[in-house]
Image: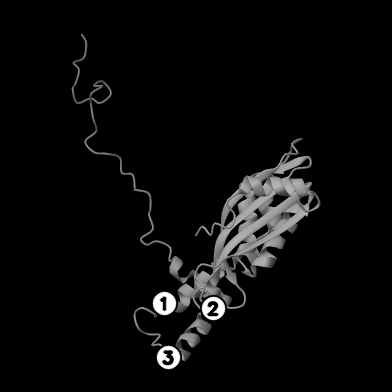
Amino acid sequence: MTSPKHPTDSHSNPDHKPDHKPDHKPDHKPDHKPDHKNDHKNDPKLEQMKKNTRSTLELLGEDVEREGLKDTPKRHAKAMQFLTSGYDKDIDAIVGKALFKEKSNEMVIVRDIEIFSLCEHHLLPFYGKCHVAYIPDGKVIGLSKIPRIVDVYARRLQVQERLTTQISAKLMEVLQPLGVAVIIEAFHLCMMMRGVEKQNSYTITSSMQGSFRDNAITRQELLALLGGLGQGRR
């Protein structure tokens, strides 16, 4: 005589569902997000810059407690840190392993690299385009590294003449090419919004090294390929 099946027997009834779900505690989630707003309080340099900006605003006769200016010292200090962040950059680390053996010895040009820098005389911006060319001698560099190198030097207190030569000198050092050329076209707010107030004037500087300096034909080829210099594009 066989035993009757009991529908309540969970082992014999495949459709059986437990009356309740297992008591699993949900993953713990923090009740609050990390407070990144106070991170700057650990930076004594930033705090001193804030105090200096606040003092300048007060000397200008401004009410530093009014809504529009209350956080301006902090914003200005953080902006200045970003705009001068090139001092803390390591170009060798930026280039990393992005140097590749290559037999090519034809001209490479990266043009119209946007630059934004600060004139060291008035701490006003100058901005424009940087054109970089080099002729390889056994190795090439990852193209994105060239604008990164430009930014390292542009994000410092600068004059355009020095910025141009610093970029070309560093590329000669890193690449050891047959030649390097750097041309910068820039508008300077220190002579646009103050001083002589010439809004349509701009400055072109160049630094030619190696075959670009020594060989007029190579230099002419570069200028012909670039074309359009002096158009004052903003």
Q: First in sequence: mark 1 or mark 3? A: 3
- Identify residue type, mark 3: Gly
Q: Work out how far the residue at label 1 is from the one at label 2, CA to CA, in angstroms.
A: 33 Å
What is the C-alpha distance between the residues marked 1 and 3? Answer: 17 Å
Identify the residue shown where x is 36% and y is 78%.
68
Mark nearest the camera among 1 and 3 is 3
Q: Left or right: where does residue 181 sit relative to residue 52?
A: right
The residue at 38%/53% (across/down) is 28
Q: Is residue 96 visible?
A: no
Could you say whether the residue bearing mark 3 is in a helix, strand or loop? Answer: loop
Which image quadrant is residue 17 in? top left
Q: Amino acid at mark 1?
A: Asp
Q: Which residue is mark 2?
A: 196
In the rendered image, residue 34, in percent from the top left (x then y), is placed at: 43, 63
| Other-residue count near label 2 (Cα within 10 Å), few / some / many at <14 / 14–19 / ≥20 | few
Q: Position of residue 23 (x, y in %)?
A: 31, 44
Say which mark, if any, is on residue 61.
3
